Image (tube, rainbow, N blue to C red):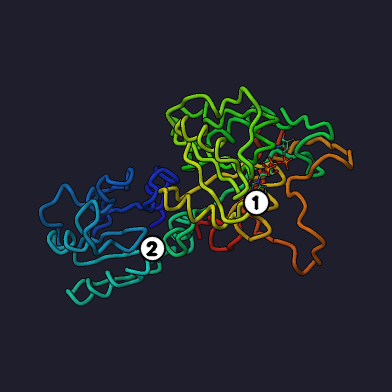
Amino acid sequence: MAKAITLAEKTLDQTEPNPAVGALLVSAAGELLGEGWHERAGAPHAEVKALEAFDQVPEGATLYVTLEPCNHQGRTPPCTQLLLQKKVRRLVVGCLDPNPKMQGQSLAYLKAQGLEVVSGVLAPACTSLNRVFNKHITTGLPYVTAKAAVTLDGKIATALGQSQWITGPEARAFGHRLRSQHQGILVGRKTLNQDNPRLTDRCSPHPRQPAQVVFASTGAFAYGLHFLDPQPQRRFVVVGNQAGKARLEALEAQGILVLVADQAVPDPKWALQQLYRQGLVSLLLEGGAGLWAGFLGQNLIDRICLFVAPKIMGQPAAPGFAGDLGALGLAQLPSFHFGPTRVLGSDLLLELFQRKEDVYRLD
Ligand SMILES: NC(=O)c1ccc[n+]([C@@H]2O[C@H](COP(=O)([O-])OP(=O)(O)OC[C@H]3O[C@@H](n4cnc5c(N)ncnc54)[C@H](OP(=O)(O)O)[C@@H]3O)[C@@H](O)[C@H]2O)c1
């Protein structure tokens, strides 16, 4: 199963809206007979590739899969039928599919068809592989990773608004790769106006450029922003109900989809629901502090990537990454679980998760 997990990891955060899955076919003598992983949505499932060399698997072979095989016709046929066709007799599964239509139904079906089924092997690691899928399929909301580059005292910009660059090139390159691993990037209007980010991945060898989403209550922007240039990525502006009609028409004329909330300041959860309907299942919130506060206040951040520079700002007027969360008592503070920490050049990356089961560990 550990080997199947490493296969699934090959396309981690690249298979949305599907899960990343790895599969192995092993003979009774422990010899590797086939392996597969799910490349991308619409491509064959991992089981299909692991079994493809055989019309019927050899006697005594075991199929290991990180996730319960599918039992329904989607863009590809059900894997349960393939297993029966190929005469798989023994199946070992990492974790159940949390899709409300599944949750062990495939395994019950296969057992009823006479297969020996073992499940729950390295389940925590297999579950955490698919934190994005697990979240969106059970809640109808995208998975939100929030990222920020901070000084040791948690500041994201100087008191005068200078933020480029707090961290070094290695941390920035990692931040670019995060963009390719998400389907959309979220930024607040003030960050857009002040930093004029391009919101693209310009570091990965094979970048997948995410959609760009700007939160701007009134839809008013500075002139000359990269965001307003024509570009192939989908672009969205989330506005409140006070935004002027002419402004919104001008944005739409540039191919930008405007999402108009019922409130003056768009409700973040409502915005996530709209973006999910647009097919976005994973989002990277890049700030600034105002947007962080809006999302943290509603418990909508699933994962945090905090790039910490070994510098101290020490300016009380400089903004911290979390924004103003109001006068919360200690018991009400948003809290997270630490995941892995890495050194990136002279900076540290702290990864944190809202749910403990999202912390990846191979145990
Ligand atoms: N170091 C880093 O990693 C990093 C990353 C990003 C940004 N920054 C820095 O952060 C600073 C900007 O941060 P900021 O806090 O001033 O502004 P911000 O978070 O970028 O933008 C806040 C604006 O977003 C709009 N908004 C719409 N709906 C919202 C909602 N539900 N909740 C919150 N905001 C909503 C509002 O626009 P309206 O005003 O139109 O109502 C609000 O004023 C800049 O100095 C930038 O350089 C640093």
Left or right position of 61 against 2: left
Q: Residue at x 77, y 69 (%)?
A: 331
Which residue lies at the image location 50% right of the left edge and 40% below the top edge? 236
The image's mark for residue 151 is none
Q: Residues within 10 Å of mark 2 (few under 14, many from 20)?
A: many
Q: Earlier in the sequence, mark 2 or mark 1?
A: 2
Badge 1 residue CB within 8 Å of ligand 1? yes
For the question of whether residue 171 can be seen, the reply is no
In the picture, measured across the screen, residue 351 lies left or right of residue 228, that is: right
Percent coordinates x, y for residue 214 in the rendering = 58, 40
36 lies left or right of 124: left
Q: Where ligand 1 lies, by quadrant?
A: top right
| Front-lying residue, 115 or 145 | 145
Pointer 1: what residue? 265
Residue 283 appears in the rendering: yes
Residue 142 at x, y percent in the picture: 49, 53
Kindly identify which residue carries mark 2. Answer: 94
The image shows residue 193, relative to residue 337, as above or below, that is above
- Position of residue 294 measured from the top left corner of the image (x, y, whole percent): 67, 53
State how far apart marks 2 and 1 are (Cα): 43 Å
What quarter of the picture does the N terminus occupy? bottom left
Helix, strand, or loop for circle 1? loop
Q: Are marks 2 and 1 in contact (CB under 8 Å)?
A: no
Mark 2 lies on a secondary structure that is: strand
Q: How many marks?
A: 2
Q: Residue furthest bottom?
A: 112
Q: Which one is nearer the viewer's eye here, 158 or 175? A: 158
Residue 354 sits above or below residue 39 on the image: below
113 w.r.t. 63: above or below:
below
Q: Position of residue 301 (x, y in %)?
A: 61, 55
Front position among marks 2 and 1: 1
Q: Amino acid at mark 1?
A: Val
